[in-house]
Image (cartoon, rainbow, N blue to C red):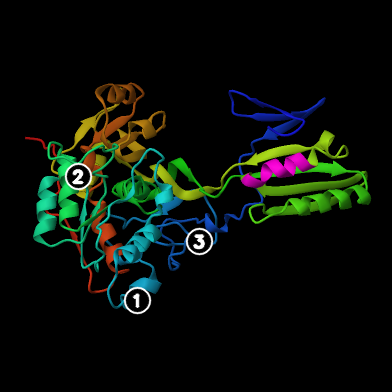
Amino acid sequence: MFFGCRTVLCAERVLLLCCPYNPVPIKRPLADSTFSFYQFFSSSLFPHRTLPFSPQHPSLHSSASSHPCPHHRLPPSFSGTPHHSFIPRSLSSSVRPAGVMDLKEVLDVLEQLAPLSLAESWDNVGLLVEPSKPRPIKTILLTNDLTMPVMDEAEAMACDLIISYHPPLFQPIKRLVQKNWKQRLAVRAVENGMAVYAPHTSWDSIKGGVNDWLIGGMGSGSVSVLSQALSSAPQRHKLEFCVRNQEQLNVIMADLKETQTSNLQHHTTVRSEPDGYHVSVTCAGSALTPCVQMLVGHAAVSPSLSITQLQPAPLLGCGQGRLCVLDEPVTVAMAVQRMKSHLGLPHLRLALGHQRTTESSVSTVAVCAGSGASVLQGVKADLYITGEMSHHEVLDAVAKGTNVILSDHSNSERGFLAMFKERLTIRLPESVTVAISKSDRDPLEVV
């Protein structure tokens, strides 16, 4: 609590810092207007101009565009088959790195392709098993799920690193025993000196990731994100106040300068007005307390002081789920056939919306790989596509007139591995072999 102030936390999460007789509201704007959005904006998922990967452009295909827009477009040629156009020209036209790579170097590449900061807070992503003895990474096995047959396959090929889309270790572990199959997998990985890495929802969120691959099966259209990802930059605040004359301004600016230490980074602007000066100070969350304590100690500042908590900037193109407005509407029957072809499946489950038929038109499609009901809930679309939904979740969608296609959980994700294999391979030395598991499959099948 700040000196001379009282703090109130409301249900709407709006904080009021009140000096005696002078309320100081903390507002929550939609975005931080002073934040540099260059690193987040791109107008197209697959622009004609590509750039080498940069952390400022969080995308699996490392693209950029000169026209910022929250939507991106899928070209008619988009499909689950890996394609040269998805790889930056600067990489696809160059020789692969030479030499060998250790685990840390491979993890750096994986982080570049899909930053773990994009994963959901509840998820367990990243390096899950780390060998005690470092060794060069020569063989990498990609799988959607790490199961006993996949581990047998990994042992047979002397695998050094298993990249399992789903984290095989999710819940906290108190012991490693043979009674639990996931713990047996962890023990086997340790015994064989294998590292295990899981990207999960970071692959879902990243631009050009699992969800963009999934929606690509429906053809060309304008694509937007259903649940927008936000920047993981440190929390910042904007302090604004007015002073009457140059003398007051000089004193306050001198005091502000004294509060600046290694962890207090200020950005200050001063605007001259007819009745004095308007001052705006942007500071990191760690600098908020000393700044406010100093400012409320000045009688000239306290009445006009306002504090704004700046919202993180959006990472456009990144987030959970996708909504596509198709360039050309299709029938429900055509949508089913397209997804069968895209996913490589002979059968899908279909629920027709209320008063809909297989010849009903589909113009808008919402997708979420895996178990997508929580992301798709409330989204207005002609068709939902996901791996699985509960009985009652399907009934809710049908009652609203929305058609539903279900492929079973991992079938809505697994096809992306082929695309990721190509993106990863070109960033690794030729001494590294990247393979896709032949044993990995969804546990459910239609018989």
Residue 81 in the image, given as x and y percentages of width and height: 24, 58
Label 1 packing within 10 angstroms: few (<14), some (14-19), many (20+): few
Residue 341 in the image, given as x and y percentages of width and height: 20, 48
* Residue in front for this viewpoint, 351 or 390: 390
Q: Which residue is mark 1?
A: 93
- Let me know if residue 384 appears in the view: yes
Q: Are marks 2 and 3 in contact (CB under 8 Å)?
A: no
Residue 194 in the image, given as x and y percentages of width and height: 20, 57
- Let me know if residue 344 appears in the view: no
* Residue in front for this viewpoint, 86 or 257: 257
Q: Which residue is mark 3?
A: 65
Which of label 1 and label 3 is nearer to you? 1
79 shown above or below 409: below
Magenta segment boundaries in residue numbering: 286-294
Residue 190 lies in the magenta-colored region = no
Disc 3 marks a residue whose amino acid type is: Ser
Q: Which residue is mark 2?
A: 340
Q: CA distance from mark 2 to mark 3?
A: 33 Å
* Residue in front for this viewpoint, 354 or 340: 340
Q: Which of the 4 quarters of the picture holds residue 180?
A: top left
Mark 2 or mark 3, which has the lower sequence index? 3
* Chief secondary structure of the magenta portion: helix
Disc 2 marks a residue whose amino acid type is: Lys
Q: CA distance from mark 1 to mark 2?
A: 33 Å
Q: Which of the 4 quarters of the picture holds residue 242?
A: top right
Which of label 2 and label 3 is nearer to you? 3
Circle 2 SS class = helix
